[in-house]
Amino acid sequence: MGHRISDCRSPPRNNQGRSQAQPQRNNISRHANRPQRPQRNTPSRQQFNAQVTEVNSDTEDSEDDVEEVTLGNNMDLAQQDSAEESLNINTAQQAVPAQENKLMIVHGALDSTSVRILIDSGASNLLCRPGLAKTVIRSKEVQAEGFDGHCSGIKKVKEVSGTLCFGKWTFPDLILTEWDLGKEDFDVILGKLWFFRCNPVIDWRTHQILNVNSGEVEPERIEGWMIKVTTKTEPQQKLHPLVARVVDEFRDVFPDKLPNTLPPPRGIEFDLTMKPDARPQHRPPFRLSKVEAEFSDTFVDDLLQKGWIELSNSDWVSNIFGVPKRSDDGQMLSRREWLRTATPDTPIRWVLDYRHVNSQSIVPKIPLPNIEDLFDRMHGCRVFTKIDLASGYHQMLVMPSPRKYTAFRTHRDVYEWVVAPMGMADMPGIWSRLMRRLFDKFDFVVVYKHADHLRSICTVLRTEKLYARPSKCSFGVDSVNFLGHTISKDGLHVDQSKVRAIEKWPEPQSSKDVMSFVGLASYYRKFIPDFAELVRPLSGLLPWTTSNDHQ
């Protein structure tokens, strides 16, 4: 959950002037184990008021902020006791109140309730006191790890959602975890997730938040800002004139989005043969979070508009859930980060859990293309074109009789596919059969004989109403990335991005992790001499034991 509040370095608070009925908060700071020194001459209260009011001009409780100040800009470090030596020797030379030893606390409101907010990049989560947020999302069990590595027992807490406001910033539908903050002098903690999501610009000398970058943050006012918005674009391929002429001629084959129509019948459609004793399995539905439910509604509405799915009464119902895909800028959130941050622009891959249907079906023994044969056939080529069909399986119809086996459910209703879905065990073979029938006279996956073959292949795509994704296509280039390899006139090489993924693979923590790593690395075993000898120590870990030799 992050570090404990008691481990934060905070200066002693001056409790003079507080109500005697209010329990005094324990001083938890770098001075905690040192004797309190007598009060010495400091700048006047009016001077501190001026400094703090400037920093927190939009708060009402300026008196409380004054009591948190322990150093003024006019204090000479040489006058302080050696037992309380400052952590910043340049404090006396600064022209602003010293803030480096203060907790960064701002005043705000959570669902219209006044709160004090601790902004803490050392905490991992977003926390609030119980009862402040109005919307409860779910209950969960958590374990908190302190700054010193100490772990608390497992607690059952609530995950809540609310609108948080402070300064000129508003954060709608912010997801927080309720946590008992005890006698701490704040009600909300904004931790690392908030920093990651909003990327705030903070003046650490004054503790002012100058700007927040987030699609979900709505500033109530903007005063004196000049904002320059730039759009990142990928450099366009410089095409050979002959290739560019063909691509331009067949622009309709490379649309930005697939048409909102059904694919035509082509003589080979998706069919499914079930085992004689096949029976549907009644599994409980996956519980979708609020974020996932909203995204799934958008996904289903889009498919219904295109006519790709329809309502179903099938007993063969499978579940669906979302997994974030890599964005155009190369970033990819984990599923947990996506559900917590609810980033609206995150591309989502919807996964259908067809495991039971696949176990009850008879998969046709259709041969798939051999990757080594494809590499061999491209040996010696100098110019390459790669065409990637957009959502390829969705460009094939499902025959009426097996549609009931493709049914899936959301929180809203049950639907079945009219076009071929992802996740069926039969699909790779049937799709390969269609590709072979359409492109049997070409080297159909990677086109390496150009202008003439490219025109012929684009003609077939146009006739059969098959559409390619332009962002994933390459035309007339000297190298292409294909199935985890880089192919060029110099031969076959490993894809460097995959090598970096292997190098950054986290240290295995179980035998399953070891199996995953060995399986990933073995994909490139033909490039590694004596690969079996290298992985022998790891193979010995599969009956999970560990020692220094293994490390």
Image (cartoon, helix red, strand yellow):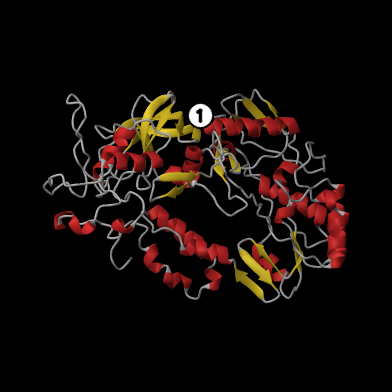
Q: Residues within 10 Å of mark 1 (few under 14, many from 20)?
A: few
Residue 87 point in image, percent of width and height: 26, 57
Residue picked out by circle 1 = 283
Q: Is any part of residue 405 visible from this angle? A: no
- Residue 367 in the image: above or below residue 277: below
Residue 352 point in image, percent of width and height: 58, 38
Q: Nearer the viewer, residue 11 or 452?
A: 11
Q: Nearer the viewer, residue 367 or 162?
A: 162
- Please give left or right for residue 372 compared with residue 192 in the image: right
Residue 153 point in image, percent of width and height: 25, 38
Secondary element at image label 1: loop
Residue type at the position of mark 1: Arg
Q: Residue at x 61, y 44 (%)?
A: 347
- Please give left or right for residue 115 compared with residue 248 in the image: left
Q: Residue at x 72, y 52 (%)?
A: 432
* Quarter of the image with the N terminus in it: top left
- Residue 377 in the image: above or below residue 403: below
Q: Is any part of residue 108 visible from this angle? A: yes
